[in-house]
Every structure is written in C-alpha cells, then in structure tokens.
Amino acid sequence: MIVGVLALQGAFKEHMDFLNELGVETLKVRTPEDIKTVDGLILPGGESTVMGKLLTRYNLKLPLIQLIRSGLPVWGTCAGMILLSQNHDHLQVMNIDVKRNAYGNQLGSFIRYETLKVLDEKPLPLAFIRAPYIESSGSSVEILCELDGKIVAAKEKNMLATSFHPEVTNDKRMHQYFLDMIKNRM
Ligand code: GLN
C-alpha cells in the first residue's frame, strides 16, 4: 500500500511522518503521474487558496477529480477539507458546504477532546488551526463528529473530511481509520 500526501504546500510532512511511524509507505504527490501510483491520498492543511491555485498550475485538478470520483480514498484535513467541498471552487467532489476560518484567526487555534463515531470511546484530541467547519451536508454524508453543534468530521463514500489536524497530536487513530478505508477498497 502506498499512501500519497499532496505536497504542494502546507502540513504534508507531518502526515508523512505519522504514516511512516505506522509502517506505511508514503509518496509526496506533486504530478499527475504521482497520483496514479497511490492507493489513497491525504490533502493536508495549509492555505486552501494557494493549494487550489497550485492544483491547477500543476495540472493535478482534473486527474484528481476523476480519480476521486472513481473511488480513490481521499482524506482532507482542514484546508484539504475546503478543497473537497462543494462551495469553494477547487475539487468540489464532496457533498459538504464549508465555512472557512470559522473560528477566527491564528489566535483562534485550540485543542479540544471529543469522541468520534467511527473510533473507540476514548476522546480524540482535536487540534484546530484557523479551522473551517461544515455548515451543511447532503444526505449521503455521514457525520462523524460535532463540536458545539458544528460538524467537524464527516465521511461520504471514499471521502473523509476533518476540520482538525490529527497529525499535530500524538494520537494516530484517525490515520489508522483512513488506512482501514484504503484496505477495505483494495
Ligand atoms: N485557514 C486555512 C484556509 O482557509 C485553513 C487552515 C489550515 O489548514 N490549518 O485554507
């Protein structure tokens, strides 16, 4: 299994380190050829406007949309979730509308603990960094976690989206869950 991490901008190294610690082979995804070789793909946090522009510039946007539509497991964290959403003009593959910078500026970064529907009962540390949340979602979207009444984790078919950054905590259960999504498809 090879897990790709989109490596145009943002927090891709942290995801790669986490996956490597879990014994998984990783690939920095920067070209349309790279995408074809991975079994799953993480869209990291960073700056969604910059990443969106780079997706177009590196001719990644259309191949990525096609591969996700054909079932490639994909997980967007924070800015990555914005890339997947319907209401921002990037990949627009997931049936969610997302509010950017929904918790304010850098000073609005914080950690909370919450249980997730698809993990065990132990609360997961949720690290929010200028995070978005999901304002509305379609009927095919499964809500995995709400914080103060706002959706912060969701899944739709092969697509996973989280407002928070598990890769900056020391809890690997969310990465393990994504690896299970990939294994179930392989
Ligand atoms: N605020 C960023 C954006 O709107 C997301 C922040 C992050 O990914 N940590 O793209």
Image (spheres, helix red, strand yellow):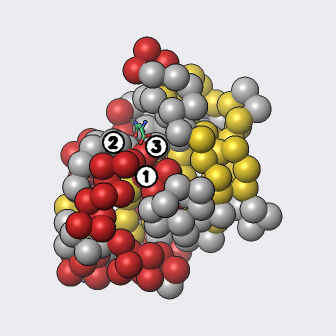
Vertical position of residue 176 compared to residue 159: above or below: above
Q: Are marks 3 and 2 in contact (CB under 8 Å)?
A: yes
- Quarter of the image where one finds residue 129: top left
Q: Which residue is drawn at 38% across and 78% down?
A: 62
At label 3, the amino acid type is Cys
Q: Residue at x 60, y 47 (%)?
A: 98
Q: Does the residue labelled 1 lie within 8 Å of ligand 1?
A: yes
- x, y percentage for residue 156? 64, 65
Q: What element carries label 2?
A: loop
Q: Residue 46 carries which label?
A: 2
Count of numbered circles in the view = 3
- x, y percentage for residue 25? 23, 64
Q: Is mark 2 within 8 Å of ligand 1?
A: yes
Q: In this view, does 110 lie to the left or right of 62?
A: right
Label 1 crowd (10 A; few <14 / some 14-19 / many >=20): many
Q: Residue 80 carries which label?
A: 1
Q: Does the residue labelled 3 lie within 8 Å of ligand 1?
A: yes
Mark closest to the chain's N terminus, 3 or 2? 2
Label 3 crowd (10 A; few <14 / some 14-19 / many >=20): many
At label 1, the amino acid type is Gly
Q: Residue at x 23, y 67 (%)?
A: 57
- Quarter of the image where one finds residue 96: bottom right
Q: Do the residues labelled 2 and 1 touch (CB within 8 Å)?
A: yes
Q: Which mark is residue 78?
A: 3
The N terminus - image quarter: bottom left
Q: Is residue 168 visible?
A: yes
